[in-house]
Image: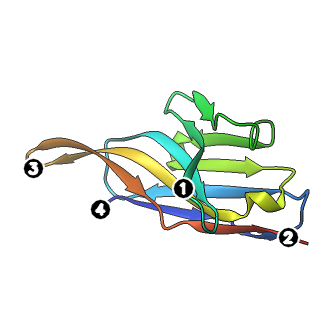
Amino acid sequence: QVQLVESGGGLVQPGGSLRLSCAASGSFLSINPVGWYRQAPGKQRELVATITSGGNTNYADSDSVKGRFTISRDNAKNSVYLQMNSLKPEDTAVYYCNAGVLTLGTTGTRYREVWGQGTLVTVSS
């Protein structure tokens, strides 16, 4: 069973920084891509950023995170990170890690989407 575990959330003041981590555990052939999503209270879950195994990144198609958030990964550690700088109250949300996971079973390979349990980020003074 493949699991994604997020960490690094918490309470931070406006203008502050946080670094979220997403660690994959279990048995798998590959994890690609990996993305961070967020869901603010009363809103739909939205994409923040994604990264491929080769390091190609994609950020939400809005100005809400560009230039402030940076996604990165350490393939050796099966981990993906989200560095968040200049945080704003509107960044308050539960942040989820999402990954496409390729596993090998008795009937062959299987590709599926896996979600983490989420980590809460609260930006408030």
Earlier along the polypeptide chain: callout 2 or callout 4? 4
In the picture of the structure, the residue carrying the numbered disc 1 is 45
CA gap, disc 1 and disc 2? 21 Å
Earlier along the polypeptide chain: callout 4 or callout 1? 4
Name the outermost residue toward the left.
107
Is residue 8 at all visible to an observer of this figure?
A: no
In the picture of the structure, the residue carrying the numbered disc 2 is 124
Earlier along the polypeptide chain: callout 2 or callout 3? 3
Question: Which amino acid, mark 1?
Answer: Arg
Confirm or deny contact between disc 1 and disc 2 (CB under 8 A): no
Q: Which residue is drawn at 56% across and 39% down?
A: 50
CA gap, disc 2 and disc 3? 49 Å
CA gap, disc 3 and disc 4? 14 Å
Q: Residue 1 carries which label?
A: 4
CA gap, disc 1 and disc 3? 34 Å
Closer to us: 85 or 92 = 92
CA gap, disc 2 and disc 4? 37 Å
Question: Which amino acid, mark 3?
Answer: Thr
